[in-house]
Image (cartoon, rainbow, N blue to C red):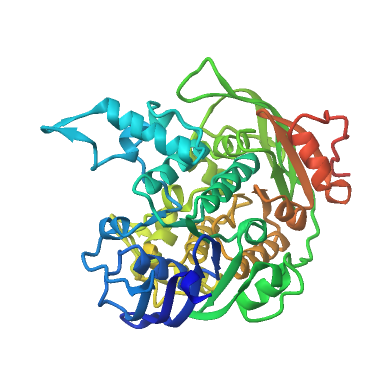
Amino acid sequence: MENDIILEFRNVTKKFPGVVALNDVSFKIHRGEIHGICGENGAGKSTLMKILAGVYPWGSYEGQVLYEGHELKLIDASIRQAAEEGIAIVYQELTLVPTITVGENIYLGKEPAERGIVNWEKLYSNTQKVLDKYHLDVPPRSIVRHLGVSKMQMTEIAKALAEDAKILILDEPTSALAETEIEQLMEILRGLKEHGVTCIYISHKLDEFFQITDSITVLRDGKTVITQPTKELNTESLVRHMVGREMKERFPKGNRKPGEVILEVEDLHALDPQDASYEVLKGVSFNLRRGEILGIAGLMGSGRTELVMTLFGEYAKINRGKIRLEGREITVRNSREAMQHGISLVPEDRKLHGLVLMQSILRNISLANLDRFASFMRVDDLAELKESLEFAQSLSIKAPNLHAAADSLSGGNQQKVVISKWLMSRPKVLIMDDPTRGIDVGTKYEIYKIMNDLSEKGIGIIMISSDLEEVLGMSDRIMVMCEDRSVTTLDISDATQEKIMALATGVASNSVPERLPL
């Protein structure tokens, strides 16, 4: 019914110099529904939400946005006016101030005050009312930095809802959450729906759309492809609409032929860099073969990222155990030594640890390898450009040129820049920590093909992933971690989601024999 429409986009077009980000986008969202918006990186999702949130003001785009039957005219290029209209957004990167309390964050800039003095009791009682109303289990007086990621996410949602938001936009809300935390978030969204809040849900995890949304809009190349009830779609049809072609397989079959053992880790123990009395690794053993993809599975907090960051020399201090590369015991005290040994790391958070976002693609690719192009206090610009261009072309990085800033790229292309940087260092072992996090299904496929190509060239790849389907789809063997220890290593022919989860949660012991190369 038309009077049930809370939001309508009519022929919305947004242009940037040389780029049409949105092209005649039109669709409707019903009041009180959870509406999914999906598409590949660069499809226009973020641009559309920035128009709705007031980041791109009225007049900077063509077409109309109708909100409760009237044209939405946000003119001050800030989210404040949108919030006053009842439109709130929770971004993928949390925007909380870590050093203050939950209540202070929720009412930051709008604290209840009398004669210029903040009424703290009122602030915290109001906070508790908001948390109780939406069944958000967060202590109002807790310092944010002491909370887990899921509690921070709840605080962001409470902050958005404190002004009685009618529309809540969630951009990749589960990218940093564990499975149990994701289910908790889903329950919160169902509760918001019961309170009449309309949610717009953006994610690259397609299964989440079928778990929580009522209808889905697909964008491709800045255009509306479909808007349909979720129950009329399935994963295959959704992927087809997103990429514009059939994808018969999610994980490309490579022609890998793992060889001899290249890396051995034996009973590795390591101490927390901030507290030497606490072990962050409590006994990890595994091996990696040349030309193999070794998956590492485990719950969040199991020590996966701590392990690979330590192997790369950038986290914990090793106090016991051995690392052997090509049969020779090595010591890795920092990333420079890791690179010299032939170990490279594509980090979990590409924006924080992988890129200098304001720098060009060229500078990011060559950054870790400048000594190759430098002599007598100067850089050979031509050699740097030539080699960087070769990697950019081989990985099909989509950009106007290599002088474009890294922050102008989509998430998938940013990830390709990070991979290019570490491939330039000519690694023997490439560690990839959640390499497809926040990347659309089409670009994931490209990353998988890159991984296959690298392993076929003899590079040993260690891949961490929170997506068990990805681990099972891309690995030759899978090492499972639980509570900062390695449990066992499974051959892919023996691995199932159920077996991995039983090992990762400690339900099953390491009675499964570790399969070592013959």
Along the viewing direction, whichever of 32 and 324 lies nearer the viewer? 32
Q: Position of residue 330 (x, y in %)?
A: 61, 34
Report which quarter residue 318 is drawn in. top right
Q: Toward which corner of the image does residue 84 lie, by quadrant?
A: bottom left
Q: Is residue 470 left or right of residue 372?
A: right
Number of numbered discs: 0
Q: Is residue 77 above or below residue 268?
A: below
**Is 501 rendered above or below residue 509?**
below
| Residue at x 49%, y 62% (from the top left corner) | 411
Instruction: Confirm whether residue 291 shows in the render.
Output: no
State the residue at coordinates (54%, 46%). 176
Q: Note whether 46 is above or below 356 in the view shown.
A: below
Quarter of the image where one finds residue 111: top left
Residue at 89% x, 44% y is 518
Q: Position of residue 273 (x, y in %)?
A: 48, 25
Outermost left residue? 115
